[in-house]
Structures are given as structure tokens and as C-alpha cells.
Image: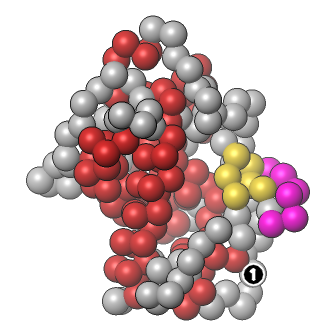
Amino acid sequence: MKLRQNVKHFAAKQALTLPVVGEQVNDWLVDLHTNVFAKKADDDRAEERRPHLDDFFDATMDTYVAALDAGFPEAEAREITHVQANFDFYNHGWTEMMEFPSDELEAHYERYAAFFERYDITIDDPLGTFRPADGITAAPSTPEKLENPEHPHAEGGFADDAYVETEDGEIIAGGQAEPDDVDPSMAPGADDEATSD
């Protein structure tokens, strides 16, 4: 999968594990992801999906931290959470929201199979053991879209590695090395004035 990566991603990585600011960054990132993917949804479906997306992305923040704890670099830990989201989109028939074509689902699963198996994550159960005890809000599915899936926001051909696009537009397989002097206060959501690109 192709993702963007800049210093804010590394700052968020550090901030998520800090007291107080970690919760703020978590909430900000959940809101960001819900907004981004709701905009990719069909206009008449976006609002009904928001509560589900909020709950889902909140759970994937725990996946992200677990992947970092397991030794994955930032880009791969973040990609794991995006793969989970795409499994969920596929299961709901929300193909217009997918970031990679549905015929790459298995390839993305296989790359992280050992991690996914450890946490009972499957294509059919994208959250596995990260599913909250009280569940997540349901949202209507559009299974008819799976018959002839359209993926207007998907980029295929990036299933063999985590690819990141730098601020300079360079594409790097595996992601960038983490800078030595990252300030967690630069993380999006670390303060009320924080913004992200």
C-alpha cells in the first residue's frame, strides 16, 4: 500500500503512548480518519457510516501501538491499521472507500499474517482481539457493490511492501528512517491549534 509519511507521523507515534496528550492525539487521529474516509463514501451514505468509522478507527489505534511494540517500523504499523480498515470496507461492500483493489486483499493479509494471526485478525474479522468488549456501532452494508466492485480511490500494485511518499514526492519502499529529534508536541492533535496536511 502507498501511504504518506512525514515528521508528524513520527511525532504521533511518540505522542500516542504518552499520558494525557496520547488521548488527545488518539481522538484527533480518529476524527481525521473518519473525515477522510467519509468523504470517499457515496454522498448519501457518508453520515450513516460515521459512528461505525469512529469506533473502528479508535480500535485500530490499539493495533498501531501493538504493532510498534512488536517491532514494526512506523510505516508498517500504520499500514497494518489501514489494511484492517480495507478489510472492513470490503466486508461492508464499501468498495468506493478502499485504498487498494479487492483482488489484493489476500496479498496484504499474507504480508502481515504472523501479526494478524497473533491477534485473531482475519479478512472477515478485521479487529480480532482489538474489538472492544462492547463492540462497535453497526452501519448498513452495500453488498451489491461486491459484484462489480469499483475502487475510485484505490491504488493497485503496492501489495508487496509498505511504500511511503515523502514530502518531496519520493516513493520509498519500507518507509523512512525515524529522525532522532522528533518532538511529540508536533503530533497532530497534541494541542487544540494543531493541524495536519
Instruction: Give the position of the N terminus as an image quadrant.
Output: top right
Q: Position of residue 150 (x, y in %)?
A: 56, 20
Total labels: the figure holds 1
x, y percent for residue 174: 75, 54
Residue 126 in view in this figure: no
In the rendered image, which quarter is residue 78 located in? bottom right
Question: Is 102 left, or right, of 41 in this rendering?
Answer: right
Q: Which residue lies furthest to the top in this view?
A: 147
Q: Which quadrant would residue 181 be assigned to in this image?
A: bottom right
Determine if residue 50 is in view.
yes
User: Which residue corresponds to the image point at 80% horizontal and 62% vertical from the top-left?
Assistant: 166
Q: Mark 1 points at which residue?
A: 179
Task: Give the image location of residue 187, x and y in percent.
Answer: 55, 81
Determine whether 170 is above or below 176 in the image: above
Instruction: Return the x and y of residue 84 as percentages of the image width and height.
Output: 44, 43
Q: Is residue 60 above or below residue 84?
A: below
| Residue sitting at the far left | 134
In which quadrant will I find the C terminus?
Answer: bottom right
Magenta-colored span = 167-173
**Which SS class for mark 1?**
loop
| Label 1: how many Cα within 10 Å (few below 14, some 14–19, many 20+) | few
Q: Residue at x 37, y 13 (%)?
A: 144
Three-letter amino acid code at disc 1?
Pro
Viewer-proximal residue, 128 or 138? 138
Quadrant of the image occupied by residue 146: top left
The verdict on residue 12 being magenta is no
